[in-house]
Image (tube, grey):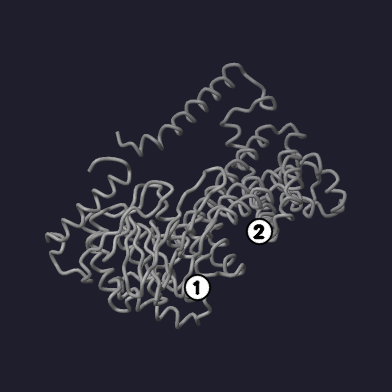
Amino acid sequence: MNRAVVDIAAPLVLIAVLLAGWEAACRIMEIPSYFLPAPSEIAKAAVNSAPILFMSAWNTLFMALKALAVASVLACGVALVVALNRTLEKAVQPLAVALQVTPVIAIAPQVVIWAGLAHPERAIVALAVIVAFFPIFSGALTGLKATDPDLERLFDLYGATRRQRLWRLRIPSSVPFVLEGHKVAGGLAVIGAVVAEFVAGSGGAQGLAWRILESSNRLQTARTFAAVIVLAIMGALLHAALRYAEQAILKRLRGR
Amino acid sequence: MAVASLAAVEVEYPGRGKALGPFDLALEEGEIVALVGPSGCGKSTALRLLAGLEQPTRGNVTRTPGRGETSVVFQSPNLMPWASALANVALPLELDGVDKAEARRQAADALARVGLAGAAAAKPAQLSGGMAMRVSLARALVTEPKLLLLDEPFAALDEITRRDLAADIHLLWDETRPAVIFVTHNVEEAVYMASRVVVMSASPGRTFNVVRTDPVLPRPAHFRTTLEFRSAAEAISRDLAASMGRDA
């Protein structure tokens, strides 16, 4: 059989087998729906609440994209400033790492308070920015410092100024690293947004996390599952879109 | 008068000992000199000294051409992968403050001179190894240098491409006759390219011998089949072997 067909079919077959086993187990053992709904019930719940799930997914995605845009500008800006000054880089590095290793959930409640309980969307964007910042920052900084030493010598030879070196060598060299950073940050921004929605825990921001909270509080477990699946699909689509954009930009940049 | 010279230069790297010297070399106007020697003897170091990319630990480097009048072609084409062939060639002019339109016009000329007028918009990844090397050569020539430093420019190319490019470099050189240093470890290339071949000893490199070859440049067709070519190549091969302490 064609290799490509096998590659696509293999995961689909596995998923189908697992779903069939799950469905059979639920029916044979008569597991109550609030405890573990069968796939068919989840599908039914997904279809019934499709419009509201879609709206919620859009809300969460919109927040994540807003955060990605803000994080992108901030992280690239800070990386650029820091790359120009070694002392500043040394000064910023530990703070950036501290920001990265602190779980977003730990600071979320305080950020929600700062944003004002009436504006959960502000807290959501802010928290998603915090988690999306680091991969873009570290990608940009690595890229700005990872110039080809042979090209550096060429710029030395022609007596390039610092400014020329930055615009004509370091920034273009950093593009692949910056794109890679955005790809990672996209996924993290969704996670940041969802975590923040959980903490905000109000109907003020009607994202997917709120749907998950709401339906699990009402023991509508099938709907909870449906929301989680929508969230997973949304994350995967965002990742695929960012990867496509990355490849398209690199192709344009390098001519192939 | 010498265009560039190295006088008793020595280069030492901390922890790695002496890489070059004491070494002397004087390059006359319009002359092509080849540096041959075993790997790691400091040929490329000597070239970087002349380019001003490195400073000697001891000794003197003099060079009459200014910064903009010295060009280097490196071992790899060393092109900016994100920029078109035209933009790569225009780079030295643009860094020097030449107006962009004028720089692009001169770059287009230089590309045409190396036979790549049709590849102006191509990115380096779309070019073959030989074409990329020609773009690199056009970039070196676009400033009309007085001193042209070639650091094993054929190292990564196949035999046919090397020969074509060697002949073309002579034709391009003949237009303005800059002084040229050609670093190589290939004896036949050295004899073909240069009228004076400096054979260096193993690291730290010093002058082992100087061989004068046929002074007529560019080379006539079939130069490689002449007796002079063969005997010069054999003399240099013997010197090289002796410089490494071996029998030829």
Circle 2: element type: helix
Disc 1 marks which residue? B67
Disc 2 marks which residue? A76
Q: In the image, residue B218 lies at what x, y percent?
A: 22, 71
The quadrant of the picture occupied by the C terminus of chain A is bottom left
Residue kind at label 2, given as amino acid type = Cys
Eye-nearest disc, 1 or 2: 1
A151, B197: nearer the viewer? B197
* Badge 2 density bin: few <14, some 14–19, many ≥20, Cα 10 Å: some
Locate residue A79: give its quadrant. bottom right
The answer to whether B138 is drawn above or below residue A252 in the figure is below
B208, A219: nearer the viewer? B208
The answer to whether A20 is drawn above or below residue A66 in the figure is above
Which chain's residue wears label 1? Answer: B
Q: In the image, residue A183 lies at what x, y percent?
A: 58, 49
* Badge 1 density bin: few <14, some 14–19, many ≥20, Cα 10 Å: some
Q: How many marks?
A: 2
The answer to whether A106 is drawn above or below residue B124 in the figure is above
Query: Which residue is located at x 36 percent, y 64 percent?
Result: B181
* Position of residue B3 in the picture relative to residue A108 (left or right): left
* Position of residue B163 in the picture relative to residue B8 (left or right): left
The answer to whether B159 is drawn above or below residue A208 in the figure is below
Locate residue A46: give its quadrant. top right
Locate residue B179: give its quadrant. bottom left
The quadrant of the picture occupied by the N terminus of chain A is top left
